[in-house]
Amino acid sequence: MSIATTPTGIGIAEAAARPKRGLGKLVARLLVYGLPTVMILLPLVSFLASSFLGQDNGKPTGGLTFANYAAFFTSSSYLYVFFGTLKLAFTVALISLFFGYILSYLIWRLEGSARYLLLLLSALPLVMNYVVKIYAMRSILGFNGFLNTMLLSLGIIEVPSRLFIFNQTAVMLTMAVIYLPFGILPIFLALERIPQSLISAAADLGAKPGQIFMTVVLPLSLPGSIAAALFVMVIALGDYLTPQMVGGSEGFTFGRAVWSQFGMAFNWPFGAALAVVLLLAVVALIALASLISRTARVR
């Protein structure tokens, strides 16, 4: 029994199946690339378009205007909150980077199952409810919380202090503690990728532990450290729940400003403009971190 073939020698059944396989690949590519692109780009384009709309009597108008962006750049209060939030997020990122690197390094230096057990414990807060973690921090930093109680018992203060709650300090401490696991994981993964042969070779050449850390471990873990700091900073920039729950009136951040335009003032065009400004700031931070990472690798 012979199998029919085309003039090029390809079986007829195989030639007929080719268009189907091509269609299947096209559908798969659309699902893999097209669906996420649409789900991400459409909201962003919608926000961008809304930010150029005016508002009259609480309703967006059809005319295009730059008034929303002009209102932001000409308002000293919004600019103050924006740069204050950048400073706050940068401080939180530095704190998370510092303590995250120390904890990641200590975990990485362990051997056997203890390493991954401690890594699991450090990442365990990520599965907890975010609001629960904020209330836990309030119970620690509050007027009658654990921290004030401990300071009173040690005789350091005579009356409970409000230094740790309902201000920018409370927001900074709460964010730094809650976002610390986001700093630990990228740094640990960067340390985990360092070949042990490089460390052994440096030790064989007479390098001391401090020299090995400065010349081998730290440079090779720098990309992961930058990613960790950037991750924490981006999350802190857009956070509005933490400042609202532990910051009070003194903990006003740019995330709360954006939320207030959507949830309280119902000025969606202006809120969209503030969101676009925040998005551009995040993109600029990512570009800067990428440049620093590439420069460090070249060196």
Image: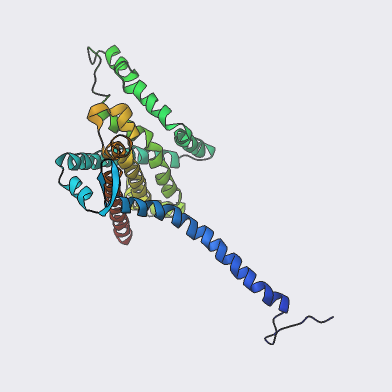
Q: Residue 288 is drawn in which quadrant?
A: bottom left
- Up-down: is 10 above or below 278? below
* 140 or 81, nearer to the observer: 81
Q: Is residue 227 visible?
A: yes
* 224 or 280, nearer to the observer: 280
Q: x%, y% of residue 139?
A: 36, 21
* 75 or 117, nearer to the observer: 75
The residue drawn where x is 18% and y is 40% is 80
Residue 50 as seen in the image, left or right of residue 163:
right
Q: Residue 136 is drawn in which quadrant?
A: top left
Residue 144 as seen in the image, left or right of residue 82:
right
Tell me how many marks there are.
0
The residue drawn where x is 68% and y is 75% is 16
Q: x%, y% of residue 184?
A: 40, 41
Q: Quadrant of the C terminus?
A: bottom left
Spot the residue most to the right.
1
Q: x%, y% of residue 130?
A: 42, 32
